[in-house]
Amino acid sequence: VQTCALPISPGTSMPVASSNPAAPAMQMATGGVATASMTGRVEPTGGGPAVEPRSTPSVTRWNQEIDKASKSGNPDVAEDILRRMQRLGVMPDVVSLNSVINACAKAGATERGERWLTYMRSRRLQANTITYNCLMDAYAKASDAKGAESCMQRMKEAGFQPNVVSYTTLIHAR
């Protein structure tokens, strides 16, 4: 079964033809017309099999915007983009939140980054090595070597192996 991201609202019928490389497969699977269901599945109107759309392209677009704000070191903008994303019904993933935490790190805002890690856990999103590296970087930029060391310890306790970035960040925190 081919998957295809179609940005259509539930109940909307539309012809399946576009510059999307998966469109020919969608045309074959749906008879050329599909309806988006409330679950996000693309249901063929002609009685063929349902096709699962990928949500990743939509999230990826938002992640690119959050990353731009992150690279500029502006956690306010990164957080605003994340909140706008959520208001529009797009659920952030670990990449989204890592980018917000990275924006906090660039500003040396350790408490703010820690709040986003707490938020991530509350949403049952699995933090990863990048998450902890971003937090360690926040502590390093805030000249808090003990905070960076504590973050590395929590990383290990969570079952993640520190990498070269982890150790380099820890060295720079000292």
Image (cartoon, helix red, strand yellow):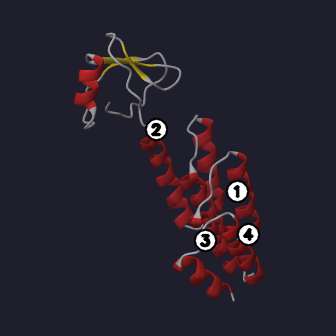
Residue 166 percent across, percent down from the top left: 59, 77
At x 67%, y 70%, the residue is: 156
**Earlier residue among tags 1 and 2:** 2
Q: How many marks?
A: 4
Of residues 154 and 105, which is closer to you in this image?
Answer: 154
Q: CA distance from mark 2 to mark 3?
A: 27 Å
> Mark 1 is on which residue type?
Trp
Q: CA distance from mark 1 to mark 4?
A: 10 Å
**Earlier residue among tags 1 and 4:** 4
**Residue under pointer 3:** 133
**Residue under pointer 1:** 116
Number of the label disc, if any, that sits on residue 55: 2
Dot 2: element: loop
At x 59%, y 59%, the residue is: 98
Q: CA distance from mark 1 to mark 2?
A: 22 Å
Number of the label disc, if any, that sits on residue 80: none
| 116 to the left or right of 41 | right
Number of the label disc, if any, that sits on residue 110: 4
> Mark 3 is on which residue type?
Asn
Q: Quadrant of the C terminus?
A: bottom right
Q: CA distance from mark 1 to mark 3?
A: 14 Å
Are discs 1 and 2 less than 8 Å apart at CB?
Answer: no
Which residue is situated farthest in the top direction here?
A: 46
> Mark 4 is on which residue type?
Thr
